[in-house]
Amino acid sequence: MKEIIYTKNAPEPVGPYSQAIKANGFLYCSGMIAINPLDNTFLNGSIEEQTTQVMKNIEALLRASGYSFNDVIKTTCFLDDMTNFSVFNEIYANYFISKPARSCVEAKLPKGAKVEVEIVAYKD
């Protein structure tokens, strides 16, 4: 069974996609950038500020779905500049204590974002 997840505590989708989909114990979350869900404005701040907002957005989706950061099994991380890798990792490590599998690549991101993270979580 498939369930579309939606919460006002995470940014509104800006295109034809869902914030997240729950299916057969898995949770697939769309990539999150630093958009404040209160007014759907992009936070054009430092890598630290953007990463923190991204983690808050992911946390909102996890909570709305009945999951937590400990249930995350895979992340895909996109940075606009790999020189931000260590700063990003410091903040990331505070949230992903369980150390899920991960990919991290440099990419040109929407709205000029410095970071985007998508996750897959699983619960029996």
Image (spheres, rainbow, N blue to C red):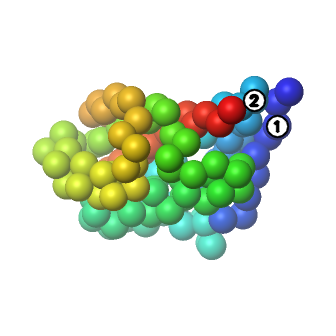
Residue at the outermost left position:
83
Which residue position holds label 2?
A: 23
Q: Nearer the viewer, residue 24 or 44?
A: 24
Q: Residue at x 33, y 58 (%)?
A: 94
Q: Nearer the viewer, residue 95 or 39?
A: 95
Q: Quadrant of the N terminus?
A: top right
Q: Amino acid at mark 2?
A: Ala
Q: Residue at x 72, y 36 (%)?
A: 21
Q: Is residue 55 left or right of residue 99?
A: right
Residue 29 horizontal/vertical position (percent): 60, 40
Which residue position holds label 1?
A: 3
Instruction: Please rate how many residues cluster around mark 1, counting C-alpha atoms within 10 Å: few if below 14, some from 14 to 19, many from 20.
Output: few
Secondary structure beneath label 1: strand
Where residue 101 sits, quadrant-wise, is top left
Instruction: Please rate how many residues cluster around mark 2, counting C-alpha atoms within 10 Å: few if below 14, some from 14 to 19, many from 20.
Output: few
Residue 72 horizontal/vertical position (percent): 51, 40
Tell me if label 2 and label 1 are in contact, CB under 8 Å. yes
Q: Is residue 14 left or right of residue 54?
A: right
> How far separated are the C-alphas under marks 2 and 1?
6 Å
Q: Is residue 48 above or below residue 73?
A: below
Count of numbered labels shown in the rendering? 2
Label placed on residue 108: none
Q: Quadrant of the C terminus?
A: top right
Q: Is residue 31 visible?
A: no
Q: Is residue 87 visible?
A: yes
Residue 62 horizontal/vertical position (percent): 62, 51
Q: Residue at x 49, y 33 (%)?
A: 73
Secondary structure beneath label 2: strand
Q: Residue at x 33, y 52 (%)?
A: 92
Q: Is residue 52 above or below residue 120?
A: below
Q: Amino acid at mark 1?
A: Glu
**Mark earlier in primary sequence (2, 1):** 1
